[in-house]
Image (spheres, helix red, strand yellow):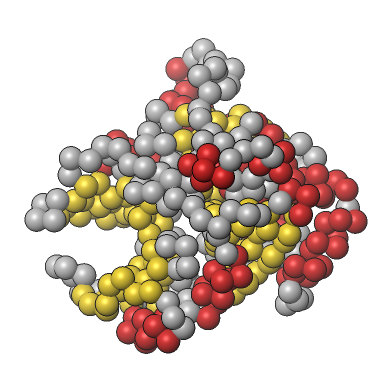
Amino acid sequence: MALPSSSSPPAPPLSVSTQIKKDSFRSHSFKLSSLQNGNNTNDNNVASFNQNPSRRLALLKLGAAIPESHLLGVKASKLLSGDVHMMKPSTSPKMAPVNTAVAEENALEWVNKDKRRMLHVVYRVGDLEKTIKFYTECLGMKLLRKRDIPEERYTNAFLGYGPEDSHFTVELTYNYGVDKYNIGTGFGHFGIAVEDVAKTVNLVKAKGGKVTREPGLVKGGSIMTAFVEDPDGYKFELLERGLTPEPLCQVMLRVGDLDRAVNFYKKAFGMQLLQRRENPESEYAIAIMGYGPEDKNAVLELTYNYGITEYDKGNGYTQIAVGIDDVYKSAKAIELCGGSIIREPGPLPGINTKITACLDPDGWKSVLVDNVDFLRELE
């Protein structure tokens, strides 16, 4: 489940739920009957979508694209700057106050007992067809589902290496008339595990793709890597690992305080610190966070560059969705750990999937989606 800004910058609560739902619903709904049958779900999904008013409402509530009503009268320069939809945490209380230390302690303990998994990542692109072609032909992903919502002026495409109920996936959003986004300096890259980095790099070159770093060993390590860029400028690190159950294996974000970020994701999200490495010569440090070994699960790579405390987040990258068992306890834990709740925990109108959305101490957004509700949607 993705939060309101799954396909568009932050907006009012309705837009937020729209994006939230969209991220998680759209990125995880390629298991619809049409997808299970191996068909192209674009036409089939649109048909069933139009024939089922309640489903249509639910999808719109979860949509992450920029609503048409928000686009009208907005200058392109303002849209691209992210001003129109940049969701900011509310200063007003989002949840009923908890009066006992016991309740707070229970909320924090719950995080470590909860069953969690990274579900998908959402971001915006300027040329959907060109991006889909690059991901499928150069990176080996599969187009899982595609949906066009003309009345809201956006199209979504869902790609990955396996079913959404068991794999980390991407949700691409194309907003009509917007052909370029500011990626900013905060987003780093996505990681993809491949069997042969050199072979993949040659394929990217043959298809006219951009290689920003040729194959080579990681400094001080033994892993062969390379960097390529997709048509919108999003970077992908290719890691030579051989066969893996989770090829789309990493999202790298830059943070202004590594200790603070690690502490937040451990306590508020229940992630494990899988690896931490300092590189004083190059003046940076990284921490790998996740819910299992990085060779078998998607992970979050947090990078701190010495002396830099703030980054431009742009308006291209949106959010990560995480599956959880209790959105209410999870939201309370996030608040207790210094996060900001930007979407109150609870069911989405018209579909009853329970979600909550938050910003971490660095302002990166995540959407938490109820596991049972998520699986129900995939059916």
> Picture coordinates of residue 148 (x, y %)?
73, 59
Q: Nearer the viewer, residue 69 or 93?
A: 69
Q: Residue furthest right?
A: 51
Residue 44 in sight here: yes
> In the picture provided, is 290 more to the left or to the right than 319?
left
Q: Nearer the viewer, residue 300 or 373?
A: 300
> Picture coordinates of residue 94 (x, y %)?
57, 22
**Hey, which quadrant is residue 297 in on the image?**
bottom left
> In the picture provided, is 164 more to the left or to the right than 113?
right
Q: Residue furthest left?
A: 281
Which residue sits at x=38%, y=33%? 361
Which residue sits at x=21%, y=70%? 218
Which residue sits at x=68%, y=47%? 63
> In the picture provided, is 148 more to the left or to the right than 116?
right
> In the picture provided, is 113 more to the left or to the right than 195?
right
When the figure is inspected, residue 144 is found, relative to residue 113, above or below; the finding is below
**Count of all numbered marks drawn on residues in the image:** 0
Q: Nearer the viewer, residue 18 or 322?
A: 18
Residue 165 in sight here: no
When the figure is inspected, residue 193 is found, relative to residue 15, above or below; the finding is below
Which residue sits at x=81%, y=61%? 46
> Picture coordinates of residue 11 (x, y %)?
61, 35
> Picture coordinates of residue 25 (x, y %)?
67, 52
When the figure is inspected, residue 306 is found, relative to residue 41, above or below; the finding is above
Which quadrant: the C terminus?
Answer: bottom right
